[in-house]
Amino acid sequence: MIPIFLLLHNVEEALTIPSYLPRVAASLPVWLPADVVPIFFGALAVVTAIPFIVAVWAFVRPESRAALWSLLLIQTVVLVNVFSHAAVAAFVLHGYAPGVLTALAINLPFSIYLLRRAARENWLSRRALALLLPSALVVHGPILVGLLILAGIVVRRG
């Protein structure tokens, strides 16, 4: 269900972000080009495809701890993303933010359920489970920002 729920979330974002970009354009970082829509849709395509690829890997190699950990990492990144959507909705847009409905209604409860089940049923070692959150923060933070900076540079030079 991980890639399916993320797909639903990304569809909500894709359908709603274009109408919200003008409201947040003034607060966009200077390293992003004025028209971030191509970057956004490209990023959505990539972050939608990756979970499907990892889910297939985990399905084909069910004994692979690396595949399972990667799939749980994706869900942990989604959990971190829930809080970023809630923060943007509350503190930046003071209401709805693109993606916040599926983040709170689907991704938050599913993340809690899945990660609690993984811990309770010892799907991975305690150490592997403990590394999920710091790894997700790195993926959702510096890695994501770095990729967006790179995309902005490419689009600007385009």
Image: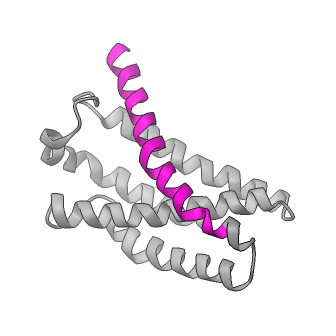
> Taking the image as drawn, is residue 3 in sight?
no
Identify the image quadrant of residue 98. bottom left
Q: Give percent across and percent down for residue 109.
A: 47, 80
> Is residue 102 rendered to the left or right of residue 74?
left
Q: Nearer the viewer, residue 53 or 137?
A: 137
Q: How is the image coloured?
A: one colour
Q: Residue at x 28, y 54 (%)?
A: 16
Q: Give percent across and percent down for residue 94.
A: 13, 65
Is residue 17 depicted above or below 35 in this figure? below
> Is residue 72 rendered to the left or right of residue 143?
right
Q: Residue lying farthest top? A: 157
Q: Give percent across and percent down for residue 9.
A: 43, 61
Q: Residue lying farthest bottom? A: 120
Q: Give percent across and percent down for residue 153.
A: 37, 22
Helix, strand or loop for the magenta stretch, by majority: helix
Q: Residue at x 22, y 30 (%)?
A: 30
Viewport quadrant of the C terminus: top left
Identify the image quadrant of residue 130. bottom right
Q: Residue at x 37, y 59 (%)?
A: 12
Residue 138: in magenta span: yes
Is residue 26 depicted above or below 66 in this figure? above
Q: Nearer the viewer, residue 113 or 133?
A: 133
Q: Residue at x 45, y 40 (%)?
A: 43
Q: Bounds of the magenta span?
A: 129-158
